[in-house]
Amino acid sequence: MSAESPVRPTRRAARKTIVVDESDDELSLIKEENDEEFTPAPKRSPRKSTRRQTTASANTSPRKSGRQRTAKTGDGIEPSQIFDPEETMPPSEPASPSKASSPSKRKSTVPRKSRKSLAAPPVPDLPTPDPSASPEAEHMHPTPLKDVTSQALNKNPQPQMSPDILKPPNQADVVMERPMDIVIRAKAQGLPVVEEPTGPKSRMVIRQLVMTNFKSYAGRQVVGPFHPSFSAVVGPNGSGKSNVIDSMLFVFGFRASKMRQGKISSLIHNSAQYQDLDFCEVAVYFQEVVDLPGGKHEVVPDSQLVVSRKAFKNNSSNYYLNGRTTNFTTVTTLLKDKGIDLDHKRFLILQGEVESIAQMKPKAANEHDDGLLEYLEDIIGTSKYKTPIEEAAVELESLNEVCVEKQGRVQHVEKEKNSLEDKKNKALAFIRDENELAEKQSALYQIYMAECEDNTKVTEEAIQQIQGQLSAELEKHAGSEDAIKELEKAYNKAVKQYERIEKQAQELTKELAKYDKENVKFEEKRKFITGKQKKAEKTATSSRLAASEAQSLVEKHSDDIQRKTSEVAELEKEMRIEEQKLAVIREDLQGKTQVFSDQIAVKQKSLEPWSEKINQKQSAIAVAQSELDILRDKATSGQKAIDQANAKIENIAAEKAHKLEEIEQRKHEKARLEKDVRKIQDALQKLASSEPEVRSQISSARQKADEARSSLASSQNQGNVLKGLLRLRESGRIDGFHGRLGNLGTIDEKFDVAISTACPSLENMVVDNVEVGQQCIEYLRKNNLGRANFILLDKLAQRDLSPIQTPENVPRLFDLIKPKDDRFRPAFYSVMQNTLVAQDLQQANRIAYGAKRWRVVTLDGQLIDVSGTMSGGGTRVARGAMSSKLTSDTTKEQVQKLEAERDQLERQFDAFQTRQRELEASLQEKQDEIPRLETAIQKINLEVDTCTRNLADAEKRVQDLMAELAGPSADDSQIQGLENQITLLNKELEKLHSETASLEAEIQALQDKIMEVGGLQLRSQKARVDGLKERIDMLNDDISNAEVAKTKNEKLKIKNEKAKADAEKDLESLSKDLERLEEDTEKHKSGAADLRGQAEKAEEEQTSMKEELGDLKKDLDSQMTELNSTRALEIEMKNKLEENQKVLADNHKKSRYWAEKLSKLTLHDIADLEGTSQSQDEEQPQQPKDEEMHDAPPEADPDAMDVDEGNPSEEQSPTPAHPVRSQLQTFTRDELLDKNKDHLVASIAALEEKVSNASSIDLSVIAEYRRRCDEVASRTSDLKSAIKARDGAKSRLTELRNLRLTQFMTGFTTISSHLKSMYQLITLGGNAELELVDSLDPFSEGILFSVMPPKKSWKNIGNLSGGEKTLSSLALVFALHVYRPTPLYVMDEIDAALDFRNVSIVAGYIKERTKNAQFIVISLRNNMFELAERLVGIYKVNHMTKSVTVENRDYLATGRQAIAPRAIAPGQPGQIR
């Protein structure tokens, strides 16, 4: 076991190092020491107490270690001057087998069994008797002792056997093992891994000491030989026992002050017989022994070592090793290599210092001090990480500053580069614009030429097909009129059936409304109860908080009273001291002031009764005033409650009146609505009877006129694809083609930009089915007309197309479209989905990014997709995708004729239909409003009832408060009484003051005279005493006020607790009322369930019948449309034939014109400039092409068919932003179809304007910009390298901190576990542990040593008795020995503070449990030295110390007589019997 003396050298002393003049290599040997490998013990289970539990934590910043200095050889060199705390030298000896004993054995409290002798193998001429099996030493007869002083001192004993000697393990072999590996290995095994010796190992012991003229030892004196395990040094006080330890300190290099002398020369012996000696010398004889089974020992051959030191009168000293002169460094290095811990002096425990080991501070207060944390870190070996961690932190900070500097340079060069961006971009943009203008003009001219060619082919084919198409249409629609009449009859019959079902549904709805009214009543009642619950909860909460606050104030005032009372006591104590000083001053002046003092004493004697009366009156006034304030506050609070209740009554009454007035208004409004409903129903009945006749006339005329106008308006903008397909349909070769989707519906001109931007798919073609679509595709491919997308009506999914609820009630784009026919509504929905229309971008942002994502388009063409992407804006917006009127194929003359017929009929029908719609809308609105009014009236009635109840409650509350306030109150009389009492007391106080005023004035005059005689000293002392009195009076006043406030808050607490209990009682009652209401509500809901089911069934029948009516109406309209188309077909075909002839001639002329313009275009060669620009652009992240993304429909349409690769628009097939070519490109037919002609025209116009307006373009900026880019790349590379170096330094710092923490916590856990076991063992049941002050960071606050002595509670080490402190320190010493053994221990009266029982326990432990180390114990307690294997007696004759060594042997007392001991002089053989 190991321990360190609490009087260790401080870190300040450690810095003042004095090292002999050895080479740097020799000095480095001192530092080349590694920690011994160890295995942590298992974690102890937490004890069940309220004490805090600590855990391992992160490491903290280490403190700087001390520096070393050099000095010349020959100076007084001490270990405390050269040893650095970092230079821990672990012993090389592994733990002995005794350390692996089970915990249960350590905790055993049974009596010790008889022990066998553990003496070393005896020399041949001193045979050792057989070991005794006698009982414990304290129960034996006097122990026989054998004198071994006369044995040869430096002779090598002959071993009986030659076992294999195991060398100590090399520390370098294990130092590289990571601590985390050790911890993980120990945890995986689940048990403490104790190093078991594989065989006997040697250890260093002291055989004897030879002292020459050292302190009290005159001449040459031999002390020893010492036993390899346990030796005791005994002798009377003053005989020189402690000089044995001083001799070892002298050899080990300690300074003279550590040996109780002022200088080295004082260590030379000086007595009457030996005076004026020239030197003193001490030689320590070491040898290595091997522990053998049975407690025996064997000396290792050739292991003897003699270390000596000689001091001279001139305060110099020399070191010797085996007789040869050496130096201090060599000696200390050798002893460290042998395992003697000179760094921490754990081998040495001086007299009276044992109990201070465990009383060290948790952590050193500064870097020059030592604490328990630093003590354990040095032993565990983690202190060696402090300096590397500090250096790594400094390195990290330095590298971080480098990174900041390099980042600033990068930003600087980037700023310079960015300053050239505008000039560079202008130069490149100008040249790029010119080339782009030429490329777009080339593409546009080629498109025009291709369109002319396509139009020529289609026109020639159309002329041949028109006649056949006309014949086929006439034959196809034969007999359509008869079918239309049958459909009209079926439609009228279905209308009557629908009206009957609708009436039945309305009756059920009215019945259901009655149940809803009842439900409203229940809801209002629930709301009323819930409101009262909240009010009661609020009252309970406020009362609880007020009671808690009052309790807090009571505690605060109690604390103030206690604190100020203690302050008064301190001040009174101080005042007594000052009064004594004042009395001394007055005593000095007694001769001069005696006359005045006597007069003052007489007058003060007469004043004392009056002063006592004044104090009593003032105290009574303060108490009465406090009670009066409390009663006044109570009276004021009652009046406030009445005022609040009256205000509440006024509010409730006003609310009730307002509700009654509102009921009357709703009743009048309901009566008016019922009257209006009857009138509107009569008018609608008359209009319905005349509707069929008017509708049949207007339907045909309107359809023809609308189709003709729409066809004429859109014919000018049709593309080649649409024109070709329309000609195909007109020729009669295809049936089921309806045309372009945008031409099949209309929308208000206000939304033209919005729908053109949000729905590019309006260019898709609409067909009935897949077969028609395939015919169209084959026709387009055959004639090379281009591409098109097709929507198949029969494949569209059935969706709910009814209006939806939208944010802020903005319109849905789909709902704004008026389709040509209802069967086209699914087609429009498939390409638009739920796209909404917003007024501006601000509203669009609110809607699009709300709780639910929407696709939103603004009126000015800005689009926000569901994904969050935004597009649109710019100088040009999309228009014309859908017109406000339908289109059809006809001539201008036909349109005028049909519109004249339509206008005449529409003037009649519009008025009729407008009137009917207005009446229907008004009827529906009023019918819907009547049930809402009835429900509102019922709800207001319930609110009136609630107001009535609340009003009654409030009035009752006012009455109660007024009765309480108006009735005879004991408080009023008490207030009056207190006021009278205070008035009377004040008068009496004034009277007392007036009666004592003259006496006080006389006393003051006499005191002034004394002050004049006493001078400044008396005045100042008198002022000091008076000041203390004033402070005491002020504190007494504060204490009185605090007591009054405490009483007041105690009363408030009781009051609030009662209010809380009342509120909780009300809450319980309201909860029961709410439960009953819930039961009634459930019964009501079950009664309404059947009626609701019937109503839902009727609504389903109504919906089904409405859908059937819609289908019949759709079929009827379709038949009418087809019939009207057939009648106009012949005229249309003739007009189209003439038109096609004109188109054919016009296309030939246009084709020649565009070919001539195309031949005049050229490109500028700027490939090198474009390459530079693109290389810079590649450094930026690629942005998504929003135009491509946003042109797609909001939802992929599974029913759309693609021809070739996509829509012929530029957005869907974008070209590179900056193509690099030197010649204009000739496009193929497919490439031309991918381009959008309108976009090209707009781009050309913009580019022409841009190029013409460009000025002051500097092209020389390109070279400067390229140079700046290279500089930015270079600076950025430097920055990355610096960041990499900084990150590496940060990783190293983190690794060092983690390594220090892991290794420390592993050793700390092991030491704490051993400490607990050791303390339990030596105290027979106590407990002790080391705790981290800060469980999150063991290095921040340090370590606490807590102890729980047997049958006591946990205590801090500073609160223990002397014996308990000694036992705690010894437990720590033994625990450290288990963790890191030291082969040698010298202890000076460690048992001085222990009783006989604990001395026996400690001595027994040293004897039985520490056989792997040599213990030399100085003791005067027989319980200790009787257990030693060998005794060294010290005695003094004529001021000269001598010694005798005897062996301590056990023997059986039976049959033997006690033999009196016989003293043997040193150097003479013999025994003491």
Image (cartoon, rainbow, N blue to C red):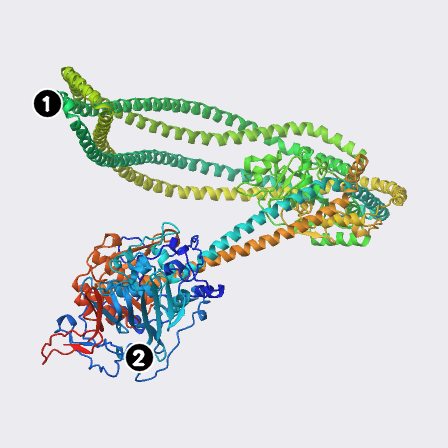
Q: Nearer the viewer, residue 309 or 961?
A: 309
Q: In which quarter of the view is residue 1124 placed?
A: top right
**440 over 653 or under it: above or below:** below
Tags 2 and 1 touching, CB below 8 Å: no
Q: Residue at x 45, y 69 (%)?
A: 172
- Judged left or right of residue 4, residue 1439 is left
Q: In the image shown, does 814 or 476 lie closer to the viewer? A: 814
User: Mark 2 falls on what kind of element?
Assistant: loop
Query: Label 1: how many residues lie within 10 Å, few (<14), some (14-19) or many (20+)?
Result: few
Viewport quadrant of the N terminus: bottom left
- The quadrant the C terminus occupies is bottom left
The image position of residue 708, as x and y in percent, is 76, 37
In the structure shown, which secondary structural element does the residue marked by tag 1 occupy?
Answer: helix
> Pointer 1: what residue?
605
Q: Is residue 922 left or right of residue 1137?
A: left
As drawn, the residue found furthest toward the bottom would be 161
Q: CA distance from mark 2 to mark 1?
A: 95 Å
Report the residue marked by disc 2.
155
The x, y position of residue 1448, in whole percent, is: 19, 74
Residue 1232, compared with residue 319, is above or below; it is above
Q: Amino acid at mark 1?
A: Lys
